[in-house]
Image (spheres, grey):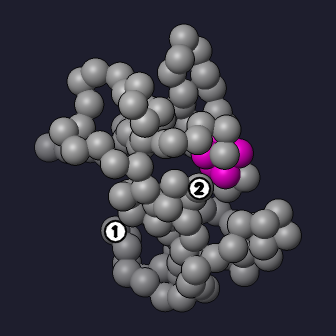
Amino acid sequence: MIRKVDHMVITTENITSLIAFYEAIGFSAKSANGRYELYSGDFKINVHIKGKELTPNAKNIQSGSGDFCFEVDDDLTVLKEKLTKIGILTELGVTTRHGARGEMASIYLRDPDGNLIELCSYE
């Protein structure tokens, strides 16, 4: 039985912009030996640079094709205002959605590669 997601991999065309974005939404970044990782809680995102992917990798690599939802502890209205102040605009929110644990509030934004990022809170 699958217990939880340990990590996922995304591909970027601009590592500097991508790391800045994910740090702004609460991840911490680490890099070593050409590898980039983004951490939050007990979860990480491995980041590959387009054309320099580590092997093995996905068959059809394309940056900006992801659609992810991350649960946050923050009040989404306050978080949305904070993100707007630093230049990260939301596409939709605050809106009600249904997640793994039931009804939740969500906001949607895009990372620099165009991946759709949903931030949700079960309040």
Extreme front residue here? Answer: 51
Position in image of residue 22 (x %, y %): 63, 49
Residue 16 shows in this picture = yes
Label number found at residue 112: 2
Specify the principal SS of the magenta part. helix
**CA distance separating discs 2 and 1:** 26 Å
Nearer to us in this view, 56 or 23: 56
- The residue tagged with tag 1: helix, strand or loop? loop
Q: Measuring 61% from the left and 45% from the top, which residue is drawn there?
A: 18
Residue corresponding to mark 1: 100
Magenta span contains residue 84: no
Magenta span contains residue 20: yes
Q: Which residues are magenta?
A: 18-23
Left or right of residue 3, residue 87 in this image? right
Q: How packed is label 2: few (under 14 Cα within 10 Å), some, or many (20 or more)?
A: many
Q: How packed is label 1: few (under 14 Cα within 10 Å), some, or many (20 or more)?
A: few
Nearer to us in this view, 58 or 100: 58
Extreme bottom residue here? Answer: 95
Q: Tell me whether circle 2 and circle 1 mark residues in contact (CB < 8 Å).
A: no
Position in image of residue 98 (x %, y %): 37, 81
Please name which of the two marks, 2 or 1, marks the residue nearer to the observer: 2
Position in image of residue 109 (x %, y %): 57, 70
Q: Measuring 54% from the left and 88% from the top, which residue is drawn there?
A: 95
